[in-house]
Image (spheres, grey):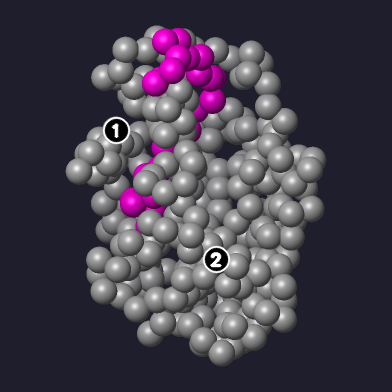
């Protein structure tokens, strides 16, 4: 068995590498310098030569606001065509594909919890590209897992937790959006879940995975900075305009993930464990 991780130097890819190292699982990790997923010939050649049994497709363009204008072409190239290249080559070698998707495939108007079977309606270029990636994987890959996640934070790369911690060092007062509700996700929990799916040979299909519980960005920030001397003030999305439309209420139902037997910590527990790991 050989696992291939695309986007191996990214936030989730790095976490997955760390997990597989701990479990002493053989894998090959590539970033854009090793294999440009937008290059069909390069992807096809690499995957056919390696013949992986599992591909964790973590490579993605995630600059959500830039995807609306200057990054629009790159968003399409990586998230759509890149995914298609990986999917086609994966099917040629009968590999399982784990595709990481996002809550941005929903419009955020559902005040309940989004199930895997609920209609999608992305409101941003990034969301539309990630949904297109989902559809490509469903169409082209016989054995696949599509894992939608949200509000990702962790040890590697830029994320909301690090941003809040950094800003609190120099700002006595921070304003944070309070009218967008979702589920934070620790990369460790996400990495453990995608590995769990393949290890337990769970049913193929779409899964939602975040940490248990929901909150606003404001509530998330308050928890992150609860031991800091900083005033966190709630604001509306209208007071903090951004290029890309964010889902206002993107709480995803976790029932299907739980039914596999995977235990999901709350986002507060995950945040505490993450902070403890940072202080070691």
Which numbered tag is attached to residue 217?
none
Residue 15: x and y, percent?
38, 56
Location of mark 2 (residue): 31
Q: Earlier in the sequence, mark 1 or mark 2?
A: 2
Horizontal relation, residue 220 to residue 89: left or right: left
The residue at 45%/82% (across/down) is: 53
- Range shown magenta: 168-191
Up/down of 101 relative to 214, above or below: below
Residue 76 in the image: above or below residue 40: above
- Position of 70 with respect to 187 (left or right) is right
Residue 121 visible to an observer of this rendering = no
The single residue placed furthest to the bottom in the displayed view is: 49
> For the point 65% across and 69% down, which residue is it?
37
Give the quadrant of residue 240. top right
Query: Which of 106 and 180 lies nearest the eye of the viewer?
Result: 180
The quarter of the picture where residue 269 lies is top left
Residue 107 is left or right of residue 21, and the answer is right
Residue shown at 58% from the left, 14% from the top: 236
* Residue linked to disc 1: 268
Which type of secondary structure does the marked residue at label 1 adopt?
A: helix
Q: Is residue 76 above or below residue 23?
A: above
Give the position of the C terminus as an image quadrant: top left
| Nearest to the observer: residue 194 or residue 272 | 272
Disc 2 is placed on an element classified as loop
Look at the image and say whether residue 190 sits in the magenta stretch. Answer: yes
Residue 257 covered by magenta stretch = no
At label 1, counting other C-alpha atoms closer than 10 Å, the crowd grade (few under 14, some 14-19, many 20 or more) is some
Question: Whole-percent x and y of residue 87?
Answer: 63, 73
Q: CA distance from mark 1 to mark 2?
A: 31 Å
Crowding around mark 2 (Cα neighbors within 10 Å: few <14, some 14 to 19, many 20+) is some
Residue 165 x %, y %: 39, 27
């Amino acid at each position: 068995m050989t696992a291939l991780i695309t986007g191996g130097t990214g936030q989730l890819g790095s976490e997955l590498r760390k997990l597989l190292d701990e479990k002493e699982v053989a894998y090959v990790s590539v970033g854009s310098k090793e294999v440009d997923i937008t290059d069909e010939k390069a992807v096809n050649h690499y995957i056919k030569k390696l013949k992986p049994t599992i591909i964790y497709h973590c490579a993605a363009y995630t600059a959500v606001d830039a995807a609306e204008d200057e990054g629009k072409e790159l968003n399409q190239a990586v998230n759509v065509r890149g995914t298609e290249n990986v999917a086609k080559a994966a099917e040629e070698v009968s590999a399982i594909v784990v595709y990481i998707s996002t809550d941005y495939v929903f419009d955020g108007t559902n005040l309940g919890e989004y199930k895997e079977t609920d209609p999608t309606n992305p409101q941003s270029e990034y969301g539309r590209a990630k949904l297109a990636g989902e559809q490509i994987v469903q169409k082209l890959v016989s054995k696949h897992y599509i894992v939608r996640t949200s509000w990702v934070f962790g040890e590697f790369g830029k994320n909301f937790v690090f941003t809040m911690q950094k800003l609190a060092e120099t700002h006595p007062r921070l304003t944070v959006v309070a009218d967008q509700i979702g589920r934070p996700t620790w990369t460790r929990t996400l990495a453990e879940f995608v590995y769990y799916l393949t290890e337990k040979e769970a049913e193929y299909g779409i899964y939602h995975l975040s940490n248990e519980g929901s909150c606003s960005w404001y509530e998330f920030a308050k928890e992150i900075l609860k031991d800091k001397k900083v005033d966190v003030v709630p604001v509306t999305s209208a007071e903090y305009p951004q290029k890309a439309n964010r889902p206002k209420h993107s709480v995803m139902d976790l029932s299907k993930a739980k039914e596999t037997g995977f235990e999901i910590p709350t986002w507060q527990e995950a945040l505490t464990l993450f902070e403890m790991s940072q202080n070691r």
